[in-house]
Image (spheres, rainbow, N blue to C red):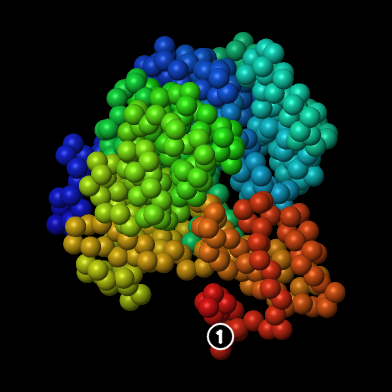
């Protein structure tokens, strides 16, 4: 096989060609081992408060028992809708220990987006921060949700501190719109009730679904990627091999500014870092750059994950250059292309190289990474992780030679089972065991891969995928819109932003009306930042809108 994997000869010393993907029958055993092994160490820190692995063990066990006590059975689905809080790891590890499938949900979703995901995934339970509960109220009757667990930002912060945080959020900042939901229970009550129960035994197989992670996939409407216990355990071992090799067990403090409902932070910052007993500092809101700077000042951060725009913004903060970075060993950029100017500045400022990685939700998510030892190739997405095959295929299906351009295809134990209830889309995306990414790239003779063109129509806003088809489908429902096309345009801050071209049905339509409509229907990163009205849209001879002409 090694002749088909030219990258192996360039693996840094100590990185294996393959990893063991059957170390645990399921995530349940993996979680239990990590929590027991590192019981005395800090697991998560937030706003000056810490939770040990023992506390995480006790609380996630109580939460698991509570879910079973409320009638959830293995395989039932529960949505998690919150930013980075202590409640997130407790809930997700509790779900794993109860056999409940997690549906990670962006808390900023609009009611329309929430309804689609919850109905499609047949969610029966939800853990939701009160800030977003009013949106759930609007669509609850259209879902099968029976169990609603609410929480607040300060709920697990304890005593006076938690009360002050919640008072500020609710009454001073007015960030909690009024809501009325039936039969809710708060998170603390769920933990107390669960602590009086015990977890009932259940069987779980490696190919059972552990997480439904929604993504646009390579085309169109959002789909639930079915990530199995085997997929996620495999990717954890792959991440361990290429990242944790440079870290010391029980000695590391890592930073998670990206939300853990995003598959990148979930896999690296939550799951993989548990294997070395790291203390992960949670950032509630990555846009609050001051809180990230503060975390660096207060903690000996040794690993950080982020996206290009975050690293760039951090370096422009006046206090960032004053930080002591002597503990920093590993920084990884994913989710969007890393600009070489950002990588160079980061290395000069912190003394730590910034390694670009590549992945997709459908691959749990990590596929490749530039070597952490600093000997990678800037501008590339690095070398495939262990136990992973990557190839470039042209439009005729021929495997390309070095330097030739074609579609990037991936094969490995981390590749998803498929899309939930979408055998048609699964069949288009996984062909003969190969994940067809839709990304266009090339491989050089050393086995380094480069992306030439992102999925042609996909727009990447600060690491989040936005699919033109969804934007167009929603805007086209507006009664005054005749036709619409969406593209990505460059943006200094977020890499790309959405631009829409609209042909009016009613001449009274203006930018303000389109913006108001979009705010009702899209979460912030999907909002069009530029709107252009046209008399017509360019089309092919079969009537398909030519986005490439709109891109100029």
| The quarter of the displayed image where residue 502 is located | bottom right
Q: Nearer the viewer, residue 261 or 137?
A: 261
Residue shown at 74%/26% (left/top)?
168
Q: Is residue 484 visible?
A: no
Say whether residue 224 is left or right of residue 22. Answer: right
x, y (%) of residue 231? Answer: 39, 42
x, y (%) of residue 158? Answer: 64, 14
Q: Is residue 297 visible?
A: yes
The residue that disc 1 covers is 540
Q: Is residue 502 above or below residue 118?
A: below
Say whether residue 498 is left or right of residue 206. Answer: right
| The quarter of the displayed image where residue 279 is located | top left
x, y (%) of residue 541? Answer: 56, 89
Say whether residue 30 is left or right of residue 472. Answer: left
Q: Is residue 402 above or below residue 167?
A: below
x, y (%) of residue 69? Answer: 63, 21
Q: Is residue 390 above or below residue 548?
A: above
Residue shown at 27%/32% (left/top)?
246
State the SS at label 1. Answer: loop
């Amino acid at each position: 096989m090694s002749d088909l994997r030219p990258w192996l000869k360039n693996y840094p010393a100590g990185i294996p060609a393959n990893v063991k993907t059957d170390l645990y029958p399921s995530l349940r055993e993996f979680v239990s081992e990590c929590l027991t092994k590192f019981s005395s160490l800090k697991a998560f820190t937030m706003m000056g408060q810490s939770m040990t692995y023992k506390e995480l063990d006790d609380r996630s066990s109580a939460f698991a028992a509570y879910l079973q006590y409320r009638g959830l059975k293995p395989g039932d689905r529960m949505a998690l809708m919150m930013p980075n809080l202590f409640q997130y790891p407790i809930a997700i590890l509790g779900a794993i220990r109860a056999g409940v499938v997690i549906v990670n949900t962006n808390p900023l979703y609009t009611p329309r987006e929430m309804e689609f995901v919850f109905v499609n995934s047949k969610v029966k339970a939800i853990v939701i921060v009160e800030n977003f509960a009013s949106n759930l109220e609007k669509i609850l009757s259209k879902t099968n949700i029976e169990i609603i667990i609410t929480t607040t930002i300060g709920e697990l912060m304890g005593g006076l501190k938690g009360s002050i945080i919640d008072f500020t959020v609710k009454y001073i900042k007015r960030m909690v719109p009024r809501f009325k939901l039936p039969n809710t229970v708060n998170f603390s009550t769920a933990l107390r009730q669960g602590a009086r129960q015990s977890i009932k035994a259940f069987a779980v197989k490696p190919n059972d679904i552990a997480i439904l992670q929604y993504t646009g996939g390579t085309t169109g409407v959002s789909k639930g990627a079915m990530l199995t216990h085997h997929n996620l355990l495999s990717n954890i071992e792959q991440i361990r091999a290429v990242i944790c090799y440079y870290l010391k067990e029980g000695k590391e403090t890592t930073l998670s500014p990206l939300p853990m409902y995003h598959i990148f932070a979930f896999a690296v910052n939550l799951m993989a870092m548990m294997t070395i007993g790291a203390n992960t500092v949670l950032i509630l809101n990555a846009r609050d750059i001051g809180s990230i700077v503060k975390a660096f000042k207060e903690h000996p951060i040794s690993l950080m994950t982020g996206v290009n725009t975050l690293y760039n913004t951090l370096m422009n903060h006046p206090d960032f250059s004053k930080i002591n970075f002597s503990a920093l060993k590993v920084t990884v950029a994913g989710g969007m292309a890393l600009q070489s100017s950002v990588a160079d500045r980061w290395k000069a400022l912190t003394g730590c190289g910034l390694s670009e990685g590549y992945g997709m939700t459908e691959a749990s998510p990590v596929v490749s990474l530039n070597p952490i030892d600093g000997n990678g190739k800037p501008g590339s997405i690095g070398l495939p992780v262990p136990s992973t095959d990557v190839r470039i295929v042209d439009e005729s299906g021929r495997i390309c030679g070095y330097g030739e351009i074609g579609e990037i295809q991936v094969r490995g134990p981390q590749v998803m089972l498929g899309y939930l209830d979408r055998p048609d889309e699964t069949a288009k995306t996984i062909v003969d065991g190969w994940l067809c990414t839709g990304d266009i790239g090339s491989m050089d003779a050393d086995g380094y891969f480069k992306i030439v063109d992102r999925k042609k129509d996909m727009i990447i806003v600060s690491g989040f995928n936005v699919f033109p088809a969804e934007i167009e489908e929603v805007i086209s429902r507006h009664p005054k819109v005749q036709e619409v096309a969406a593209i990505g345009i460059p943006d200094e801050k977020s890499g790309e932003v959405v631009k829409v071209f609209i042909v009016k049905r009613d001449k009274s339509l203006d930018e303000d009306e389109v913006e108001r409509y979009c705010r009702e229907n899209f979460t912030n990163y999907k909002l069009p930042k530029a709107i252009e009205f046209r008399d017509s849209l360019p089309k092919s001879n079969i009537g398909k809108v030519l986005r490439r002409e709109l891109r100029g």
